[in-house]
Image (cartoon, coloured by chain):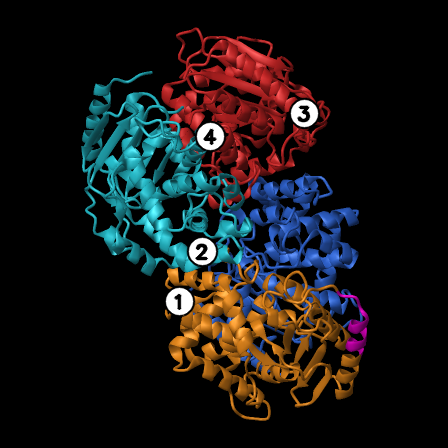
Chain colours: A red, B cyan, C orange, D blue
């Protein structure tokens, strides 16, 4: 089952060539100006294996807005702190609906279906605010620890834009509050949430950060256990069943890896015990996931011949 | 990552002891008399690894009604025959609803969300009827090939009982027909469907049959490629995201393996490239999945320390 | 508030002229051949007042398929027989959904929202079968009593066509049966239901039959109290809130009378203590109600200057 | 059909006696302290006929929080100003759901089903803000004109309480804004909305104010046409089909009059061309409508022997 180092690079080269040549329709997210103005032809990919080797192509070192990919980091941070009680306030089931749907909350008395839809991520943000004296700082510190790079930070322009247009998220957090499932001030929750979405990272940095989920909770080349094996199993399971909104089944079906996408055009996926990989291409398919990113990862598991399944 | 033969048996012994001792509430399915009269304390488990070694405890050789587990076999058989066109008639997304919900069909113009809810399995049954001259015979032949045991057959009493009480499935198939997504006579589709659910198999037989999904599509100790690697990836992915109705997320979260349950109290799960495992305990939790079966499999991946994640 | 006899005829003449001249888009129902072949330009209207005077134009004496208008007659007949218990098996609320939606049943444990959606009418049909030795005969006898015309009967070709295409109604009745809300054989219920929909009546006959709902339950020029005042209040109330599927609000808003439509293109409406009126024009609007029929009745209450509101 | 003056008072006396004696379960609204502390045994009723005669019992002159009854006044005011365009932004169909449901908005792209659910009333409030320089003042002026009583005003404590607990309404208005169906600042819309709900009026004042809907749009004993006949028809039709949330059908079925309820325990109903009537009793049934109020109005149309049907 082992794949030699050469092969990964060869496969990535092939993916770059294949996907660049294909006409894959998609639209760059436009609800805030900062996302709309990112060039549609940006395309990069970076894979880190557990030997610390790194394979890549294209715009893999350029930072972009990680958006919903941040939900994996905030969930991991929350699980480190209050694992058990968290699951009383958020579910673990795929939603069968859009990422920003409010309707399902109604049937569940304010318990979001999972931590990767917006409603669930807002509850996780609320949990972090309750547990941390300075959540925005702690969130960056966690990212610095995962990547070894202290320059990762919030794009304040993006955060401010989200805020000015985020009526649906304002609706969501107030709705959750009406059920008692937001404990802190709604403004504070939204401020933290909009900031976590506005972190800028590159494919290289994202794949390095996600190695912890491929490495049973340990930092690479370290004995430091950041997350327990059970926590990693659960986070990966949630990415598998809920990481792509109402396209989670499709991603599992075509790619066969746990992963998480963001409207900035990024997708990160994990092959437990093997590698973490990030891809970036801004145009989104109708379900809100990077069109080329999905295709590139399908090629990766097809060309390597193995996925988690 | 390798686990010695001894360990599996030791772990199964520990599971038997732990779970037998625990008070796990649940109710035996009672909608047909044949299921209702199965003793609630039946409990067995059987694990086959890819070396052909076998580990087990309890009532692992007693046959029971496989019910919805049959949907994995019928899907595999249909994919062998008309893989591409199948996905125009059935989706690959988790449903977020009960196994027998009709409401989602309405939003999807008669395209069931996935092949493992009843509506989807009825479409798969229709596909098999269109493609096979004698689908009931071909279905058994497929099971005989997977297990090497020609005595596996339909329990005609169960099939007849399903028929006499199956108003909701009759509703479902007529509803699908109203959208044009059933091509054959509704009686014929129901007859085949009720029969496939009424197959009787033991944990030992089920785990052996599911080895094909752990072995990249090949029969064990054979070069015969029954399914392609891509087909196996997709079937496992569907089990992962849709195998447990509206508890698919929970099963992934707690167990971390692709699997499929049936209301007869059986669950089969697969660790690709490692093993297939079946467990049987009739009392069901409120979501319709074997309560002890879920717990036993959670112990399996926790005690072995590894899942697909 | 009184309106002289002359005025009604003058107003109907004006309606005929106005509506005939207007380009009102619509499509003739085509799901069975017998409805599809009715000429789209048929247009007639007939109004009976409580003095027994009659006003009309166009094809008002030509019979057409009354379809869902029959649900008012079957409800009235059922209320005469088992008024109180009926309301345990069917609700009185507007559905907010299409006439043939199955999804709402799921949330209501098999209790249809009201007797005028298909599911509700199937339950009413079941009630009549339980209460009458020959329901098909009794149903016609009731129509003969209301109209004084013994020639009104079933169009057997239409009834047979409905049967051969009625997969969704077959689905519905089986679904209701799965909840225990159908007591008789599903075939018998469907046979009666398809027959009641296949009654052929003219605008003249329909308006005469509906006089009972304008006349507090009494036949015109008779002391015979067919229905109590309370029953008439309730039937009219149900027509008002549920008579036009998901366009009930629109009909109330524009017309302001209780009424009931059918996919054959007929609409009957009642002004309690004043008149009953029927209109027929086959082309349907997107909600399934006669496009010209709706417009004609809007003109009626606007030109007369009074509705029930 | 005429009813003598004596009879109305006799009937109201009988209603008071009957209903006071009956054990009708219900719970006083408690989501804000000001509503929770109103004594549960308050009970009053006031009927104004078109001759200007007035009939009453109990606490009919005590003011209470009119809450959602205010939606009829704000709709009437908005229709006076921008009748046509209003209906592009709000529908006229019953919702089949709770008054504060957000889920239906999703299916309708931010167009509330009708102006009497909270979402619809927020859009109407937005319309008034766009059309009036001082909407809060204009709203009171309209009430003063309808009642002839300039002392009617906002209860500022109630308005402030609504604001501090109104997370669901904050959610709703932000959600509507995300669809572009709120044009003004959300704070301003909420402030006006919470104020209109916080108006305090008595049964006597409410029934007098609603006479305009019984009198074809004219103030009593005046030639002043406040609303056109068509506007009154439409407002009454909306009360009939949408005035009682998901109990609109039940109210039509039992009472047979257009009406509107509020969580303060008030209900106002109209018999066009005859009378307007208000009843007040704080305990609410499970659907959120005054339990005794519903019963009292059912007695009214049953004992008088006539409703609009």
Residue C286 drawn above or below residue A114: below
Disc 1 to disc 4: CB gap under 8 Å: no
How many other residues sit within 10 Å of disc 1, few (<14), some (14-19) or many (≥20)? many
Residue B98 x, y percent position in the rendering: 42, 47
Q: What's the CA distance linking mark 2 and mark 1?
A: 18 Å
- Tag 1, which chain? C
How many other residues sit within 10 Å of disc 2, few (<14), some (14-19) or many (≥20)? many
Q: What's the CA distance linking mark 1 and mark 3?
A: 58 Å
Labels 4, 2: one chain? yes
Task: State the SS at label 1.
Answer: loop
The residue where tag 2 is placed is B173
Disc 1 to disc 3: CB gap under 8 Å: no
The residue where tag 3 is placed is A160
Tell whether position C248 is magenta.
Answer: no
Q: What's the CA distance linking mark 3 and mark 4?
A: 44 Å
Which label lies toward us, 3 or 4? 4
Which label lies toward us, 4 or 2? 4
Q: Nearer the viewer, residue A19 or A194?
A: A19
Residue B81 x, y percent position in the rendering: 45, 41
Q: Quadrant of residue C221?
A: bottom right
Residue B99 drawn above or below residue D50: above
Residue A49 x, y percent position in the rendering: 48, 12
Which label lies toward us, 2 or 1? 2
Q: Is residue A244 visible?
A: yes
The residue where tag 1 is placed is C182
Q: Quadrant of residue A33?
A: top right
């Amino acid at each position: 089952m082992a794949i030699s180092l050469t092969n990964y690079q060869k496969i990535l080269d092939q993916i770059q060539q294949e996907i660049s040549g294909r006409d894959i329709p998609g639209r760059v997210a436009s609800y805030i100006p900062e996302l709309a103005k990112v060039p549609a032809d940006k395309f990069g990919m970076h894979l880190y294996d557990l030997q610390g080797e790194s394979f890549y192509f294209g715009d893999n070192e350029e930072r972009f807005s990680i958006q919903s990919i941040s939900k994996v980091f905030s969930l991991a941070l929350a699980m480190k702190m209050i694992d058990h009680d968290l699951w009383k306030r958020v579910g673990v089931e795929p939603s069968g609906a859009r990422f920003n749907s409010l309707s399902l909350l109604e049937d569940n008395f304010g318990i979001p279906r999972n931590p990767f839809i917006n409603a669930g991520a807002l509850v996780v943000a609320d949990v972090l605010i309750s547990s941390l004296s300075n959540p925005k700082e702690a969130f960056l510190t966690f990212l610095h620890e995962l990547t070894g790079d202290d320059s990762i930070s919030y794009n304040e322009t993006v955060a401010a834009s989200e805020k000015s247009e985020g009526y649906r998220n304002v609706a969501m957090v107030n709705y959750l509050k009406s059920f008692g499932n937001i404990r802190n001030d709604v403004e504070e929750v939204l401020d933290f949430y909009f900031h976590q979405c506005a972190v800028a990272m590159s494919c290289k940095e994202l794949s390095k950060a996600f190695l912890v989920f491929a490495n049973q909770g340990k930092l690479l080349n370290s004995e430091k256990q950041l997350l327990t094996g059970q926590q990693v199993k659960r986070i990966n399971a949630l990415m598998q069943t809920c990481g792509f909104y109402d396209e989670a089944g499709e991603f599992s079906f075509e790619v066969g890896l746990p992963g998480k996408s963001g409207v900035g055009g990024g997708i990160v996926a994990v092959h437990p015990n093997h590698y973490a990989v990030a891809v970036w291409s801004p145009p989104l398919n109708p379900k809100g996931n990077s069109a080329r990113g999905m295709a590139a990862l399908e090629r990766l598991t097809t060309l390597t011949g193995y996925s988690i399944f």
